[in-house]
Amino acid sequence: MRYFLIAGEASGDMHAARLMQALKARDAHAEFFFFGGNEMQAAGGQLLLHYRQMAFMGFWEVVKNLRSIAKNLRLAKEEIRRCRPDALILIDFPGFNLRIADWAKKQGLKVFYYISPQIWAWKEKRV
């Protein structure tokens, strides 16, 4: 199978790398394309964007980087279309990943949210 994963910070990178290793143990021919970090890269596959270029913390940091965030959302959609994954796996990072999940579901993609946002942190209807 072909997987596309998005992890937007270090803990997501770690969890995604472990998931990739588990998937490889079940399917030696698994292919991985991802937005993530060094641990995912070490697990194998093609790193398309490092999470350091995606993660912005705090109100002003987000406002200053709105263009970059919009560009990263466009890039994610382009790369997902190009890679044509059998499954899209989103790891935490709800501000970004919930937007991608909504778009991907409309495209008819299989979407899996690994480590979903907590209801206490996000409105229940968004989750």
Image (tube, helix red, strand yellow):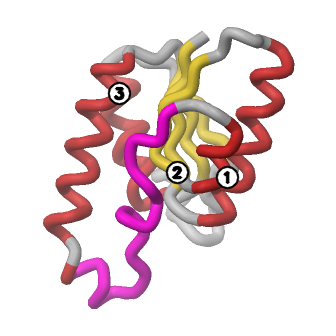
The percent position of residue 5, horizontal first and vertical second, equals: 53, 37
Left or right relative to 94: residue 84: left
Query: Which quadrant of the view contains residue 57?
Result: bottom left
Residues rendered magenta in the picture: 46-63
Q: Are marks 2 and 1 in contact (CB under 8 Å)?
A: yes
Q: Which mark is residue 39?
A: 1
Q: What residue sits 64% from the left and 50% below the top?
A: 116
N-terminal of the pair, mark 3 or mark 1, is: 1
Which is more foreground, mark 3 or mark 1? Answer: 1
User: According to the image, label 2 marks what residue?
Assistant: 36
| Neighbour tally class for label 1: few under 14, some 14-19, many 20 plus, Cα within 10 Å | some
Looking at this view, name the residue that lies furthest to the left: 67
**Helix, strand or loop at disc 1?**
helix
Q: Which mark is residue 80?
A: 3
**Helix, strand or loop at disc 3?**
helix
In this rendering, the answer to whether 119 lies above or below 81 is below
Q: Are marks 2 and 3 in contact (CB under 8 Å)?
A: no
**Helix, strand or loop at disc 2?**
strand
In this rendering, the answer to whether 7 lies above or below 52 is above
Name the kind of residue labelled 2 in the image: Gly
The percent position of residue 80, horizontal first and vertical second, equals: 35, 27
Give whichever of 73, 40 is nearer the camera.
40
